[in-house]
Amino acid sequence: MKEYIERVAIHELVNGLPKYQMFNYDRTKSLIGINPDDVDFGVDKMPAADVVEVRHGRWIPSDMGGGEPDEAYICSECGEPWVLNDGTPEENNMRYCPACGARMDKEDEHEAD
């Protein structure tokens, strides 16, 4: 699986490092290390990926105003209702909301005592 990072995070990391480090080897001075300007330039030239942040939601059971409870489920992210003929969203492998694409892995919200 590919992983994506933000360019700003790379710039902050690289710019926090020492610009150059001097190294003395056999009485010669060699410059080693990195030049943050070179890294920044390279990072800015990399192609950007077209990614979308994952939204997380949960199915909320609803009677839709007068039916059997648990016949309908509402997405906690977009509010779109879904009426199922049989079973729950989990039993029907509805791991994502068909309307907004939210990943249905958020735990139920419980009231604190």
Image (cartoon, rainbow, N blue to C red):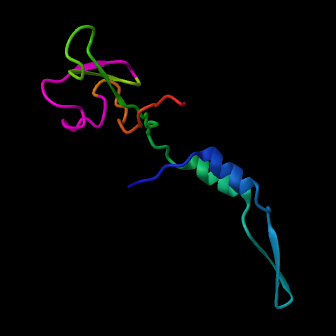
Locate residue 33 relative to residue 2 in the image: left or right.
Answer: right
| Residue 42 screen position, x and y as percent | 61, 54
User: Which residue appears at 84% of the width and 85% of the height?
Assistant: 28
Depth order, front residue of 60/49: 60
| Residue 79 is one of the magenta-drawn residues | yes
Q: Specify the farthest residue to the front.
A: 113
Magenta: main secondary structure equals loop
**In the rendering, at what x and y percent does residue 84 appear?**
17, 24
User: How many numbered discs, if any?
Assistant: 0
Q: Position of residue 90 (x, y in %)?
A: 24, 37
Question: Where residue 105 sits: x, y (%)?
Answer: 37, 39
The C terminus sits in image quarter: top right
> For the magenta stretch, what is the residue range?
78-97
Q: Residue furthest bottom?
A: 26
| The N terminus, quarter of image | bottom left
Residue 85, by quadrant, is: top left
Relative side of 60 to 40, left or right: left
Q: Is residue 47 above or below residue 33?
A: above
Q: Is residue 89 magenta?
A: yes
Which residue appears farthest toward the top when viewing the image?
66
Left/right of residue 47 with respect to residue 96 in the rendered view:
right
Seen from this angle, which residue lies furthest left?
A: 85
Residue located 29% across and 37% down the image:
95
Q: Quadrant of residue 55?
A: top left
Q: Residue at x 43, y 37 (%)?
A: 54
Whether 34 is drawn above or below 85: the answer is below
Q: Nearer the viewer, residue 110 or 103?
A: 110
Which residue is nearer to you in this view: 45 or 22? 22
